[in-house]
Amino acid sequence: MHGFDSFFRPERPLTRAEAAILVYRLFGGEAEADVFFYDVPEDGAAYLEIAGVISFFPTPDADYFFPDEPILREDLFAAICGAAGLALPDGLLYEDAPYTAYALQNGWYYADERSEHVTRGEAAHIFNRVLGRSADRTLLLRQTPVFFVDVSPACPYYADVMEAAVSHEYLAARGEEWNVAEFPSLESGLYRQSGIAYYLQPNGTLLTTPGLNEIPSGTVYIADESGLIYADNRTHLTPDGVIFCRRSGTILKGGSYNGYTFDENGFYTSGDEDLDVYVQAIYDECTTDGMTQLEKLRACYDYVRGFSYLGRNRPLDDSVKTLSYELAKGYALKIFQTGKGDCYNFTAAFLFLARGLGYNAEGIVGYCGYMWSRGAIAHGWVTITMDDGSVYLFDPQIENYNIRAGVSNEYYGAFMTTYETSYANYYPN
């Protein structure tokens, strides 16, 4: 198996083309006459392999192979069994997925892996089990080489990926032993790809100490013991506060980005000391260290909806699309100081609490039609864009209204809904 510019991408789904290449390399195959797919050109990189093993691969369409689509777990095991000449025994469980049941009985994959698709790291594990292969663990423990920056010795697929990717002779007489005298060496430095990065130290090992670490180009945040560094132009919640990880991999210090301000140490601040004090006091009151990020968000949302309603603000002009920093700060401070406010105050309060938890939150201005009025009225609410790009809507003031009106928030709630699924009708300016 090969990687992508020093990355292996073990968590990326194995594609149908990659699966065909692996089956062809390991078991061989011969192309049937006139093999043709609209999406696999004859001069394409994987045509020979796909054509050689196509008889073993279930295909949903006779004219298309869908080479870039993730391979289904059942389809992969069906192809392996077909290419290896393995017949299914009678009495298998999972009648709708007999090849998966056969693979599980033979220990080809981890019993807790029941996802529909197979990752690249898991594929290395599977093919090693099918072939009865395992890495030279003595050699790996002695040298702990970094062959791919995203597959460190802490990765559960480390040994399997090394077995699948490192060229070596298979010496089976005394168990798996490699004749690799020296592993290819990667240059030290920061390796970035698709929003993540890893730092290879001058001694040839990965930097894997979780937390903020200094490297020659600046301060980076190591997310876990694999050495993962975020390099995605997004905010991230750490045990010590919210940071902003630039695409370079280093965190932003003493600056602002898209309305977010970060202090000289790189941690998010609202930009107002009084506001920071109120926000921190609410965190201390309604969140705990054992909560997940989403659980903390929910706790803060419930706290804000518990404020008293007081319609004190004039409707904002239709030209206002989102709450500016100054508007949001004023609205938030007012409700934090008095415990009372209207939709703009509720929105601003939750906005700063959500941002302080690392969420990409915006205060939206527009109109809302709900059971409180025959027509849409001026309103404010919060949207949060999640890491996967999905956008959710949060409206603590509607839930405050529901509580006062005796309406069930279980059925008419406005926590993490969408414009399409919300019971209210939202019209952003």
Image (cartoon, rainbow, N blue to C red):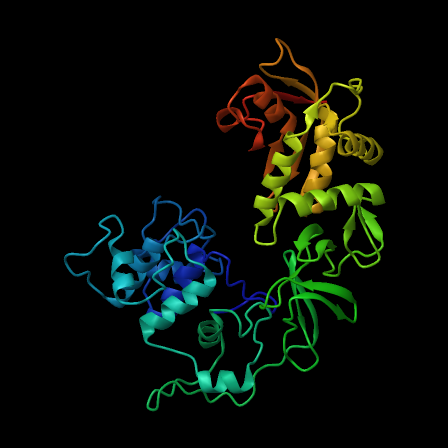
Residue positioned most to the top: 374
Between residues 173 and 285, which one lies in front from this camera angle? 285
Tell me: 113 left or right of 142.
left
Q: In which quarter of the image is residue 42?
A: bottom left
Residue at image point 35% right, 64% down? 109
Tell me: 339 left or right of 297.
right
How many marks on residues? 0
Q: In which quarter of the image is residue 164?
A: bottom left
Q: Is residue 338 above or below residue 64?
A: above
Q: Is residue 259 visible?
A: no
Tell me: 292 left or right of 411.
right
Place of residue 76 in the rendered image (x, y in percent of width and height, measured from the top left): 35, 58
Between residues 123 and 391, which one lies in front from this camera angle? 391
Tell me: 350 left or right of 138.
right
Q: Is residue 58 above or below residue 121?
A: above
Q: In which quarter of the image is residue 136?
A: bottom left
Residue positioned most to the left: 90
Residue at image point 64% right, 77% down? 186
For the C terminus, the quadrant is top right
Residue at image point 76% right, 34% down? 336
Q: Can residue 210 be seen in this view?
A: yes
Residue at image point 51% right, 23% down? 408
Q: In this view, does 83 lie above or below 242?
A: below
Place of residue 48 in the rendered image (x, y in percent of width and height, measured from the top left): 41, 62
Q: Is residue 41 above or below residue 205?
A: above
Place of residue 284 in the rendered image (x, y in percent of width and height, measured from the top left): 68, 47
Place of residue 107 in the rendered image (x, y in percent of width and height, measured from the top left): 30, 67
